[in-house]
Amino acid sequence: MHVIVLGAGVVGVTTAYYLARDGHHVTLVDRNQGVALEASYANGGQLSYSYVAPLADPGVWPKLLPWLLSPSSPVRFRPQLDPRQWRWCLQFLAACRGTRSAETTRHLLRLGHASRHLMHELLAQEPTLDCAYTNSGKLVVYRHAAALNGARRQVEFQHGLVADSDYRQEVLDSATCLKIEPALAGLHGQIVGGVHTPSEDTADCYRFSVGLLARIRAAAAENQCLFDTSIERLRVSRGEITGVETSAGLLEADAYVLASGCDSARLARPLGLSLPIYPLKGYSLTAPISDPHAAPTLSVTDFQHKIVYARLDGQLRVAGIADIGGYDLSIAPRRLATLLAEARNAFPGAARYEQSQGWAGLRPATPSGRPILGHSPYRKLWLNVGHGALGFTLSLASGRALADLIGGEAPFVELDGFTLPGAESSARSR
Ligand SMILES: Cc1cc2nc3c(=O)[nH]c(=O)nc-3n(C[C@H](O)[C@H](O)[C@H](O)COP(=O)(O)OP(=O)(O)OC[C@H]3O[C@@H](n4cnc5c(N)ncnc54)[C@H](O)[C@@H]3O)c2cc1C
């Protein structure tokens, strides 16, 4: 079968990789000059299989005012004259119910741990894949007792939901946090404790995607990458996608996978398909490590400031911030300065911060935090969109499941909770 994958971020590349491995002929289309040059470029690098609780939870309500008013808050709302932003925000608030958030966590844990299994399988099959992978383990640190108590409840809730023998989470006091991650000395006196999960991994998402691209190309001579090619419109006739109009002309295939990140909603709209995806803008900085003992070995998340730290070979990656304010990709110096100040406070002397590379990316977020996967209401069109803050982590299970479906198999992981209600039957009946 010939499959066109629309978008070469980590989600599109992973899907194309599994399709190519299954013997399909794939064409990857992207407007950039290579893979993973948008949201997948310099993300936090955390393969966060177990920390999947969505942003939309009941804890949001007391934080709403600071989000609206404080220019330095980790989440910020910048109102736009765009009804899609307001609709997304209302859907987000509706998703902030305890039962809804717990249900999302349950579904995402299933997908996250399926990804963990696939990541390890992939690394065993592709031992030369060079992506700064480490089984770093993750330590999430808390600055207030109430937040640490909330984390303890979350650990208890998740206990028993994951059928993975390596999965273990431990709540630690601050002294033990500093013992297992001595580089946290800079936060001595500022943290009250943490949660440690040894089974979490880190890797460089860009290098991972570049590595998979080489394997897609090597899998078959007819696999193609159309870069510098803008996707303009999907053609539809009698309930079936018949082609995709691009700046390189009309492309036709047996199946099409929409994996266009934040642009997926715009591309789906003319089909009458409303995908609730809106950009959550985030920032990162990457600085060369100058003192390996002062840089964290574990991947660390500062829960209150929502900042993540990962060591990617000789670089320290610092990422965070979620600005709900449109599609603009410019780097706001004040937001980047916040990240830099936090990194200097947490890990002083760890890196040559003055040489930091700043970056901003748009997380393709759904209000609930769940990606949308599987059938669309149109024959031949498949969806792999809306991975929000967890796209690197979830790309493996999502890509594998899509390849299964397109190949006519049952997906290797249950997609309940991620599919568009009624899409499969409506594709059949059109
Ligand atoms: C600051 C930050 C930190 C993050 N940290 C983590 C983390 O630690 N762990 C984690 O798992 N996730 C993390 N994420 C989330 C993760 O990066 C995203 O979920 C993921 O990159 C989304 O991948 P994607 O392929 O769906 O989108 P993208 O990477 O944006 O890919 C979409 C592709 O489609 C192409 N495209 C779109 N429209 C068109 C068009 N019309 N024509 C042609 N091409 C088009 C784009 O060029 C792009 O290459 C983070 C994100 C940010 C911003």
Image (cartoon, grey):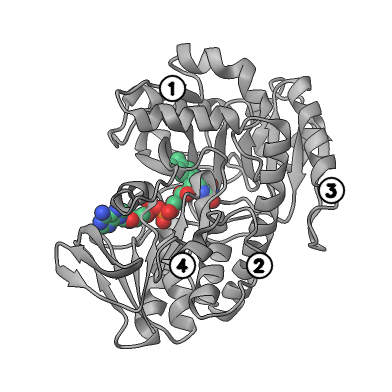
The CA distance from mark 2 to mark 1 is 35 Å
Residue type pointed to by label 2: Val
Question: Residue 101 location in percent, x, y?
Answer: 68, 38
Mark nearer the N terminus (1 vs 3): 1
Mark whose residue sits in front, 2 or 3: 2
Mark whose residue sits in front, 4 or 1: 4
- In depth, the one of 331 and 193 nearer the eye is 331
Quarter placement of the C terminus: bottom left
Quarter placement of the N terminus: bottom left
**Residue at label 3?**
159
SS class, disc 3: loop
Q: Does residue 337 lie above or below 427 as drawn?
A: above
- In depth, the one of 382 and 219 nearer the eye is 382
Residue type pointed to by label 4: Ser
Residue 378 in which image quadrant: bottom left
Instruction: Residue at 37% x, 42% y: name it.
Output: 361
The CA distance from mark 3 to mark 4 is 42 Å
